[in-house]
Amino acid sequence: MNLSSTVGDQKSTFSNSVLQLEIRGPSESHLSVIDVPGIFKNTTLDRTTKNDIILVRNMVLRYMQNQRPIMLAVVPANVDIATQEIIGMASEIDPEGERTLRILTKPDLVDKGAEHKVIQLIHDGNSNGQLGWILVRNLGQEQLQAGNVDRDAEERMFYHNVPWNRVPPDNYGIASLMTCPQELTSTVRREFPSVRSGVIKRLSDSKNLLQSLGAQRETAEQQRRILLDVVSAFQELTQHTLATNYGVNDIFDEDKDLRLTTLVSLRNNAFSHNLANCGHTYTVRSKPEEPDDIVDDHEERCSIAANTEKPQKIMQSRKNWGSSRQMPKIEDLEEIIHISEPVELSIKIGILSWTERVYSNSRGFEIGT
């Protein structure tokens, strides 16, 4: 877990790893209890850091957001409940209080005269349809160190004290936590369909994964059979590709690049289009133009890319130059394909100005030359 073992070793005091203790026996209840650290806001020198505060809060929040378990929100009775963050978090995640059981501890530390507030809080929790509050009285440090004190007996004895005897019996003592079958049953009944669906889905995924691994391949014969199956599947896929039977296998929808026949056809069309529109030196205009009106709008006419929905312009500037490749660069194919080179595009010009220019630049001494 990589946890801190000595003071000042710069390691975290908390971890997201789970330490699991399994208790079995004929009289043990069939349930799981997840004990998460308590939320704290202040760091301790050489013990906890701000990262520990964030880690613990996120851990508690993650477990609380699971809709299946019942949340036991434990707070001391001798503090202001309104200041306890865990109660606010539980109210946000479970506003109806259907799966939140609130537990009050340390009633023996409540100030004299403030007991009625705690008792009233317990009564109010029973009247609003929520799971309510349960008051428990644990042993103090001195009693724990003595080791010979009966915890349950001390709790029963404390209940006879005034005014704690006004707490409803169903809301007092550790025994009340053991008699919550109705809440547990309701939770199980509510969550069982989703649990069942989750198990079925995981089972189906595991079966599909196991099937995708294929048969055993321990012997040479089994390996040859597997290899033949792979070759046959590849040959069948190739035949479907050449025949453009793309509907027989979902792989053609998952990977569009496997539709080779279509891609080759599109590339042929693109090559034919580019050769027809960009394969000549000059493009003769159909109407007169202004002198020296050489336009660079050829990029729009020489822009088809075979594997894209939108045209890719091969001219990146106002110059009459394009690229010899229109497909994305593939590093694995660099050694077997031609590298991208600049290609001069045809010049768009009128026939009259071109004829005059050729005549002016080519005539000799004779009239006919």
Image: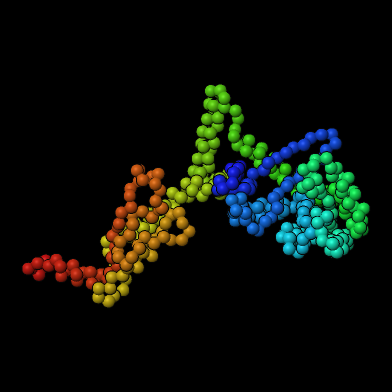
Q: Nearer the viewer, residue 5 or 167?
A: 5
Q: Nearer the viewer, residue 186 or 170?
A: 170
In the shown orientation, is residue 349 left or right of residue 222? Answer: left
Query: What residue is rendered at 48% in x and 59% in y?
Result: 309
Query: What residue is rendered at 7% in x and 68% in y?
Result: 365
Colour scheme employed for the rendering of this structure: rainbow
Query: What residue is rendered at 90% in x and 52% in y?
Result: 159
Q: Position of residue 87 (x, y in %)?
A: 75, 59
Q: Residue furthest left?
A: 365
Q: Is residue 281 above or below residue 145?
A: below
Query: What residue is rendered at 36% in x and 58% in y?
Result: 274
Q: Residue furthest bottom?
A: 290
Q: Position of residue 153 (x, y in %)?
A: 88, 45
The answer to whether any part of residue 283 appears in the image is no
Q: Nearer the viewer, residue 164 or 366?
A: 164
For the N terminus, give its image quadrant: top right
In the shown orientation, is residue 65 left or right of residue 116? Answer: left
Q: Position of residue 219 (x, y in %)?
A: 56, 23
> In the picture, residue 90 is in which quadrant?
bottom right
